[in-house]
Image (tube, helix red, strand yellow):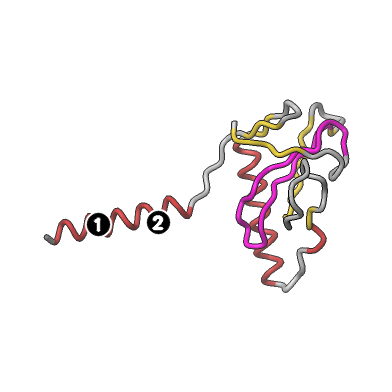
């Protein structure tokens, strides 16, 4: 009877631990861009660090509110974190943005397309 209780407790702990860790895969965008798991993970860590720092210093996140055009999506509030994708050593051709909530929850990835400004013709990227 005791071993069953121990196994149940271990199972609940394991499931809750797995749920707390976010795992990312590669993302594919409709403009033929692929963003690696490592790049998304790095951007997410940067976002969490920024949000935690802003919260501890009572800073506002208004300067990173995304208000572009996401394929006629509803006007939801997103916060973005920039990571640039470089095609060569000199020029940044495509930029992608990792979108998060104010709590640092990963909401998705958008891409601006080649040589486009954010908010012009952004597209959602999906797991690859």
Q: In the image, is residue 53 above or below residue 119?
A: below
The reply, left or right, for residue 23 in relation to residue 105 is left
Could you say which is closer to the camera, residue 76 or residue 105? 76
User: How many tags in the picture?
Assistant: 2
Image location of residue 107, percent across then percent down? 64, 50
Could you say which is closer to the camera, residue 76 or residue 7? 76
Task: Give the quarter of the figure containing the C terminus.
Answer: top right
Bounds of the magenta span? 93-116
Q: In the image, is residue 31 above or below residue 61?
A: above
Q: Residue furthest bottom?
A: 58
Task: Give the quarter of the figure containing the N terminus.
Answer: bottom left
Q: Secondary structure at mark 2?
A: helix
Within-10-Å neighbours for mark 1: few <14, some 14–19, many 20+: few
Image location of residue 83, percent across then percent down? 75, 43
- Residue position for label 2: 16
Image location of residue 12, percent across then percent down? 32, 57
The residue shown at (79%, 57%) is: 64
First in sequence: mark 1 vs mark 2:
1
Image location of residue 74, percent across then percent down? 74, 51
Q: CA distance from mark 1 to mark 2?
A: 12 Å
Could you say which is closer to the camera, residue 55 or residue 118? 118
The residue shown at (71%, 39%) is: 124
The reply, left or right, for residue 91 in relation to residue 48 is right
- Residue position for label 1: 8
Within-10-Å neighbours for mark 2: few <14, some 14–19, many 20+: few
Q: Secondary structure at mark 1?
A: helix
Is 111 covered by the magenta stretch?
Answer: yes
The reply, left or right, for residue 122 in relation to residue 52 is right
């Amino acid at each position: 009877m005791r071993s069953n209780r121990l196994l149940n407790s271990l199972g609940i702990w394991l499931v809750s631990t797995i749920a707390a860790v976010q795992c990312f895969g590669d993302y594919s965008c409709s403009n033929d861009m692929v963003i690696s798991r490592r790049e998304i993970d790095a951007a997410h860590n940067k976002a969490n660090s920024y949000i935690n720092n802003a919260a501890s210093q009572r800073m506002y996140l208004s300067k990173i509110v995304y208000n572009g055009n996401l394929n006629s999506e509803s006007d939801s509030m997103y916060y973005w974190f920039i990571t640039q994708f470089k095609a060569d050593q000199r020029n940044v051709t495509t930029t992608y943005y990792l979108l998060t909530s104010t709590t640092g929850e990963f909401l998705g990835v958008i891409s601006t397309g080649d040589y486009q400004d954010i908010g012009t013709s952004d597209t959602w990227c999906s797991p690859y």
